[in-house]
Image (spheres, rainbow, N blue to C red):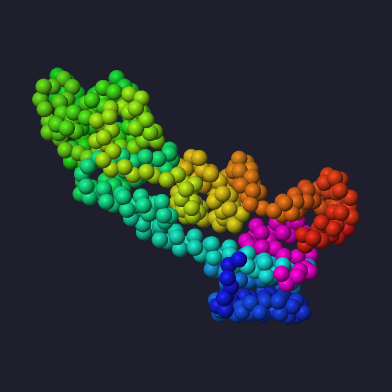
Amino acid sequence: MTPLTSKTSLLIVDDSADTRELIQRHLAAEGFELHTAGDAAEALRILGSHPIDLVVTDFKMPGASGLDLVRHVRENLPGTEIMIITGYPSVEGAVSALKSGAGDYLSKPFTKDELLTAVHRAMEKLSLRKSDRLTEDKAAATPLGIVGESEPMQAVFKAALKVASATTPVLITGENGTGRGLLARAIHYGSARRKAPFVTANCDGIPEDLFDRQLLGFAGRGPMDVQAGFFQLVDGGTLFLKGVAALPEHIQDVLLRVLEEKQFRMIGSEETHPVSFRVIADTRMDLRQLVNEGAFREDLFVRLSMNVIPLPALRERGNDVAVLARHFLNESSKLLGRPIPRMTDAALSIIKSYSWPGNISELQNVIYQLLLTTERDLIDVPDFPPHMRVAASDASAVNRSLAELEAEHIRRVIAAVGGNKTRAAEILGINRKTLREKLRQTGDSPSED
């Protein structure tokens, strides 16, 4: 559990003085700074004059409800967590509370241990959210303008800054979607060649029979027939060989000769042109393996791999996935001209637990699609593609106890049959007495249909 200190400030909101006193008594030994309010209006006055870390509020109160308070906190107080306590538990109530932004939902009656567990859990969520925002703020100012604060990305930044001041070739490796092209541009624009051209040669996309003309250019018979090639366009700048593993064998020869001689001859011309440029290449394939198989020139490989920067997969970048998700959420919202929606903790959990085989490109696309298909100001679990929901469920199940999984399954079955416990018991293969006992054990309502 996250340690709670005397600096942790809680606001207890309940129209019942007895309940407020009970919660105060349970929490007093934890060393909190405690505030109490008998209704939402009084709670708003306290929130306006005191920094509060966690609001513990009743669900049903005279005047504004606990849900109204939840919405106010979520819309105006990002540094405050909130949890609902109610004596009228229902599946619908839980869903409403959580979708409105409540961090947790606790049913009366509850034990001291249950309350403390819920409070600790809420504070852990707040701590993670603050950490995410801090990381995002730091990431915005990271070297080379690339978002990322994780240790693997710090190693990338360090290597990139080092090679940016050099003139030797750079080879960027990594899976598709990890941002190899973005890093190549960052290195160029962080170098002394930043004012000269950055030219991309897509080795996968240029037909082999046209590669010579694309690189060397074509002199033609007259001035109007001249076609400038990459070597001519890139003079003084950086040539980015995207997907260098696909470079045709005879073009490997041409490239190596130009790099060694620092001059080239256009097709159809006998005149040589001096040229100076830096090469940055990228690949998702193992070039050393291709060399061993005879599919790539070893001398060219040696020259290109003078500086190698491996880019980590998104699944290896820890909290960067949450930082990037928020970054893309902000950017895509601006692009679509709509308010930036909030993500529930459960939605953020899916993003963090998914393996992202398509890496950053897949994450960016998913966020954009969520904004296209979700008109609400809240992104929640049902908004994600089915395969992501299933993957997140499988990942979370591994780290949960059998009792937790059973309790969740019981709740889903009851919700699916509209709260009919007789039907739920039939589906679960148990009698109503056993179902009632299991509901009592989980703190859910054992009331009759």
Left or right placement of residue 188 versus residue 16 in this view: left
Location of residue 204 (image quadrant) = top left
* Residue 428 percent across, percent down from the top left: 82, 46
On the question of residue 333 being in view, the answer is: no
Specify the segment rendered in magenta.
88-113
Left or right placement of residue 197 versus residue 349 in this view: left
Q: Residue 71 versus residue 443: which sits nearer the camera?
A: 443
Q: Residue 259 versus residue 213: which sits nearer the camera?
A: 259
On the question of residue 167 being in view, the answer is: yes
Q: Residue 180 versus residue 219: which sits nearer the camera?
A: 180
Confirm whether the magenta stretch covers residue 423.
Answer: no
* Residue 95 percent across, percent down from the top left: 70, 56
Q: Residue sitting at 15 percent across and 33 percent down?
A: 262
Q: Residue sitting at 65 percent across and 69 percent down?
A: 119
Q: Residue sitting at 35 percent across and 50 percent down?
A: 156
* Residue 236 percent across, percent down from the top left: 18, 41
